[in-house]
């Protein structure tokens, strides 16, 4: 597979900013440095960085009493400590509460809140799957099957625990009067931005205030601060509305990652209404609700995030390669085994069934059967031989008659 949901929000150095564009297979846009030189009348797209330059000064009062929930496992104090230290440095104004994550390996998770299995059909419209093979190289499921009828996977313990953790936070937000910022403990605020500058606490606060203002105007349910995938300017299946693009936020079609997002009470209630139970990994679930129009989701753009930017926002994810607590059941982009959590594997003939089939084949090949087949073959060939003999006799008779007719003339 791949489910890009598994991919962290990685950003390259400024010299490699072009790599942040969407994959070559779906790339349609020219580099910003190219279309920036085109005449204004011919530009079909502008860098968000250029458009954002004219944005008004942020109204920091938009942040109001915004607070955050920091999601993490109790058994990973190292991740919590790193994140809390970073937040204290970059956003000392933000009130942060640690939210104990559901541990999928040890905690009980109600089946009516999070299902035990999920199907790839929805995610296949946006993710990139590959044939899945067993250790012997036999194909278990083809790319086509991932799309129709879809492949059933069991949630990995980490996936199910993560989904339930967000479900619990949604319950918390649903009872609030205002929005809540939800953070996972791999969120990263110290990174090189798409425009080559370094993210700072001041920049983060200003961009967040701008985003909250625009999201409020849009009556948003969700505002993603970090994202990967498809949104206005880079839709895959939806059609973009005509007119000038917003330089701060864009409508989300189907984006992955839940590393940082603002959730409004109305959005939390919508998610809880559909999550009975949640039948996809949480980022897929939220992405599908957005794609179907049931969740009004938006992504926050940063300076330098252009229309063909694949991953963006004002946060990124710390790379915990080799130290992740969440295995991607369908393999993801982190190279997990896509066969380990298959809910049902295609059945192969057992040894006894295979032996029985071979016995039947052997019986059909006995001398008696061979004689019967030969006799049938001879009978089938007989009519053809009879017709050939009759034709020869007829030709001989015609020849004799012709000789008899010529005899008087010779005398």
Image (cartoon, rainbow, N blue to C red):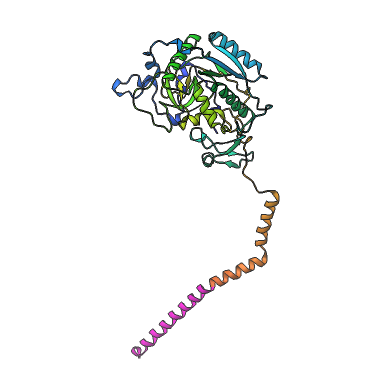
State which quarter of the image contains the N terminus: top right
Residue at image location 61% in from the left, 67% down from the top: 373
Of 17 and 226, which appears nearest the observer?
226
Q: Quadrant of residue 2?
A: top right
User: Which region shows up in magenta?
Assistant: 382-411
Residue at image location 51% in from the left, 74% down from the top: 383
Of 134 and 314, which appears nearest the observer?
314
Chief SS of the magenta region: helix
Residue 155, image x, y percentages: 61, 32
The answer to whether 187 is drawn above or below residue 365 in the figure is above
Q: Is residue 410 on the magenta stretch?
A: yes
Residue 293, image x, y percentages: 45, 31
Residue at image location 39% in from the left, 19% down from the top: 247
Residue at image location 63% in from the left, 45% down from the top: 347
Whether residue 43 is visible to the viewer of this picture, yes or no, is: yes
Residue 188, image x, y percentages: 55, 16
Whether residue 196 is visible to the viewer of this picture, yes or no, is: no
């Amino acid at each position: 597979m791949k489910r890009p949901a598994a991919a962290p929000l990685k950003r390259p150095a400024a010299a490699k900013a072009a790599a942040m564009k969407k994959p070559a297979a779906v790339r349609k846009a020219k580099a910003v440095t190219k279309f920036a030189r085109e005449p204004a009348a011919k530009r079909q797209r502008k860098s968000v960085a250029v458009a954002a330059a004219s944005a008004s000064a942020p109204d920091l009062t938009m942040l109001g009493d915004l607070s955050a929930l920091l999601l993490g496992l109790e058994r990973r104090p190292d991740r919590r400590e790193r994140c809390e230290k970073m937040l204290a440095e970059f956003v000392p104004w933000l009130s942060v509460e640690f939210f104990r994550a559901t541990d999928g390996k040890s905690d009980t998770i109600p089946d009516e809140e999070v299902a035990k299995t999920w199907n790839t059909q929805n995610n296949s419209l946006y993710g990139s799957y590959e044939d899945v093979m067993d250790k012997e190289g036999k194909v278990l499921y083809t790319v086509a099957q991932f799309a129709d009828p879809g492949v059933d996977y069991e949630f990995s313990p980490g996936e199910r625990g993560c989904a339930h953790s967000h479900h619990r936070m949604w319950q918390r937000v649903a009872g609030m009067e205002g929005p809540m910022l939800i953070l996972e403990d791999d969120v990263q605020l110290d990174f090189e931005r798409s425009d080559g500058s370094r993210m700072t606490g001041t920049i983060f606060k200003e961009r967040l205030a701008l985003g909250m203002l625009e999201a409020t105007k849009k009556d948003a349910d969700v505002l993603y601060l970090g994202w990967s995938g498809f949104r206005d300017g880079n839709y895959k299946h939806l059609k973009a509305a005509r007119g000038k693009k917003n330089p701060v936020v864009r409508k989300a079609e189907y984006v992955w990652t839940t590393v940082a997002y603002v959730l409004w009470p109305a959005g939390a209630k919508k998610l809880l209404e559909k999550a009975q139970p949640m039948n996809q990994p949480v980022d897929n679930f939220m992405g599908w609700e957005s794609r179907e129009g049931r969740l009004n989701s938006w992504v926050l753009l940063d300076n330098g995030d252009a229309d063909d930017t694949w991953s963006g926002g004002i946060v990124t994810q710390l790379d915990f390669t080799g130290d992740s607590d969440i295995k991607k059941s369908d393999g993801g982009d982190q190279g997990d085994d896509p066969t380990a959590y298959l809910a049902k594997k295609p059945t192969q003939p057992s040894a006894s069934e295979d032996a029985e089939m071979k016995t039947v084949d052997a019986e059909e090949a006995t001398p008696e059967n061979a004689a019967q087949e030969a006799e049938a073959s001879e009978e089938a060939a007989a009519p053809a031989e009879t017709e050939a003999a009759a034709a020869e006799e007829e030709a001989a008779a015609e020849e004799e008659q012709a000789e008899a007719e010529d005899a008087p003339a010779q005398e």
